[in-house]
Amino acid sequence: MTRYLTPWRISLLCLVTLYSEGSVPQSSAIHVLSFLTAGLFPLDAADKQWEEHYMPTIAELEECLSGHDSDVPGRTLWDKFLGKLWAIDSLDALETFCGEEIPSLLAKSREELIHDRDHGIAPEPENRMRLSRSSPLGAFVRRAHMEYTKLQFYDSVKLWSGFVKYRLPTYSYWSRRHRGADETAIDANLRDLGLDSTSHLSQVVYGNIEGGEDETEEISTRDSERLIEFQVGELQRMGGRVPDEMRDQLRRIMNSESSVPVLMYYLEYLDAWRAGDYTSAFDNLHRYFDYTMHTNLDRSAYQFALLNLAIIQADFECFNEAISAVQEAVAIARESHDMSCLNFCMSWLYHFGKAFPEQMREVQNSGMLGNEKEGLAFLKAKSKETDMWSLLSTTLLSEAKLEMQQGDSLASIVESFVRASHVNVTKGLATPAGAYMLLHASMYARIGATHLSWLDTEVFRECYAEGQPHDDFVKITFRNCQILVQKGNYKEAFSRLNKIEPEKLRAFKYNNAWTYYSGLLQLRRQICRDDKVAVEHIISQLQAVQLLDFDLRLLLAFYTIEFTIRQGDYGRALRMVEQAAHSMQPENFDIHSQVKLLCLKAQILGKSGQPQRGFSLAMRAANIAHRAKLLADLWEAVCTLAMVLLSLREFEATGELVESIMPQTLETEDCALIAQAYSLLVDANMGMAGELWRLQGSDSKSTRKEYINRALGYIDSAYDHYEELEDIKGQTEMMAKKATVMHLTGDSVLANDYAAKYLDLRRRRGAET
């Protein structure tokens, strides 16, 4: 494996020579220059054609040049290019081309011009274009010449052999266009000796050149390093793993090289880390930084090694070792004034403290971070000073999330979002788009604008899905499916979740999260179906996953409490509420979870015959939600309060309260909440009709009939929404209420029909459980 020169780079040098001679017309110059420069610059993941330009085959060169005319009538650029290519007919010709002809493409330097003038050397006639030494093509030519002069003889022979095999597919076309070319397919020296490619000497020097073997000599050390750098960048940006095809290619390249590039160990570390193979990850991480410390004279990689070690220790749940490593990294970064590493360490410490508050007590008590707002203020200031715009955008989003969790002003939350968006747009940051839209959708959901939350997730899926980290893609897909599930569209939700490409789930962490998300959606559906066996089975499986995300663990606790309430086990449900409340720490406190727990506890107390205690809890939940502008939670708290009032036989107050929030409740597009509100209106109207039952007179009868008609309409609306959710228990309750209403109004035929539907639903419910 050569250091830089490869057969395809020799072919590009021939194309540069063709361009400098003026053989490329003006109409084709831009196309040819674009193809040339595409292979000379660093790889760009956004360019989908980088694979063709990175190591172009002879067929790709033919595709690029055959459609363009040259300066010779009847000849294309491809014909002229083959003339240059086949003019190099021996190793000596290659030596002449790279050692003498290539330097003549460059414009003479000032020192060379002075030397020619002092020695009386006349200027050469300018019959060709000269390349500036500082231009991209000039830099390419200078480096190619320099690298060739450094080649050992053995490497020169390998380069020539690889070049012969590289251009061999064009031999049939070349031989048809040029007479006498049938004797120069491999080497002009063989022609002089009267030998062909089947001779013993040819087999010794070139091997089975026509056998079509896949040789790795076409890859240089520089190519392999660029390829590894590109893969490392992709793994760090996307969070995935190395594709199997690329892994095989890298393994073949590495096996052909005696000295493996050091960065290859870092690539292996990232891949092993994503795969959950912590032993291999540790080995490759230590190996990479051991080599880096020996080759890097300033030793600046030491603190980054500690930071990487802390990250992997935290994923391995060795929290004490992780904190120790990152504290040492912070100390060294401060001592060496490495603000970039220091900012990364402080950002990681902040997010680690949010995820594992118990493990951060000692660090918090030491005063290293201060409180959360002080830590975010530090990160914002330092990221601006060091122009770390991606970190600044992430910090602004963390600030918005903290304000949302603490129930701060909605205006300040929106301001943080606007500032983060401004940084993303002005600095051209695409990676934070996923985290931004996920948090933005969460804000809209909290204020009851579900349609805007849905729009954010759809915009991400349609416009930003490509090129975003896999973690953000999986999370936003789950959020999108959550909205579909709360509308009762289970089929579309599961379809979208199952359509996630397997490549995005190859990392152990993301596959684990996808499994958990799928289980949560299935659990939501089975709770509505009242399938006790399936629910208990799914809950036991999800509890065994042990996901580190506290919000998702709390969501599982909410679903489990709801199922327990539906089963009528109020004592156990109350204990689970208390347990969930105790699990919340100041670092992971969320006002939304607080309101949800208060509502659940109030519902349990109302159903267990203690409505007075539930009333104060419901009022407190409504007050907190109103103050924090959590409108979706506010409507749920009001419905909980109405349920408590209904237990206290305050029918008129219940009806007025629920009717006042009904339009906003419909905007949430939450079928469960809407069905609950309609059910409360049914009970409130029937309660008011019952109070008028003892009164006589036409006015009371007409009013009573009006209440009953309203109740019937609300029953139908509640039943429709329960049916959307496949909520068997809710449907049976509505059918029972409707049969009772028909019986009270004296319509025995309809009462019997609805009673039959009720029994049919009960049988279906029993069959599913």
Image (cartoon, rainbow, N blue to C red):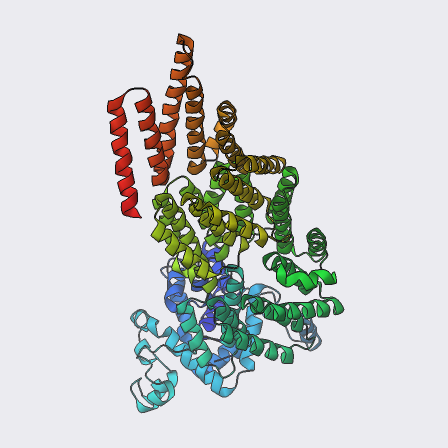
Viewer can see residue 295: yes
Pick the front one: 677 or 338? 677
Pick the front one: 48 or 170? 48
Which image quadrant for residue 737? top left
Looking at the image, residue 235 sits to the left or right of residue 625; the answer is left
| Rendered location of residue 724, percent (x, y) | 36, 37
Above or below 604: residue 126? below
Looking at the image, residue 290 sits to the left or right of residue 656; the answer is right
| Rendered location of residue 527, percent (x, y) | 39, 46
| Rendered location of residue 305, percent (x, y) | 62, 72
Which image quadrant for residue 7? bottom left
| Rendered location of residue 690, percent (x, y) | 42, 21
Pick the front one: 169 or 592? 592
Viewer can see residue 108: no
Above or below 437: residue 634? above
Number of numbered discs overlaid on the protein picture = 0
Pick the front one: 607 or 118? 607
Residue located 61% across and 56% down the image:
354
Residue located 75% across and 69% down the image:
335
Above or below 606: residue 143? below
Which image quadrant for residue 191? bottom left
Residue located 42% across and 47% down the image:
563
Looking at the image, residue 472 sits to the left or right of residue 496; the answer is right
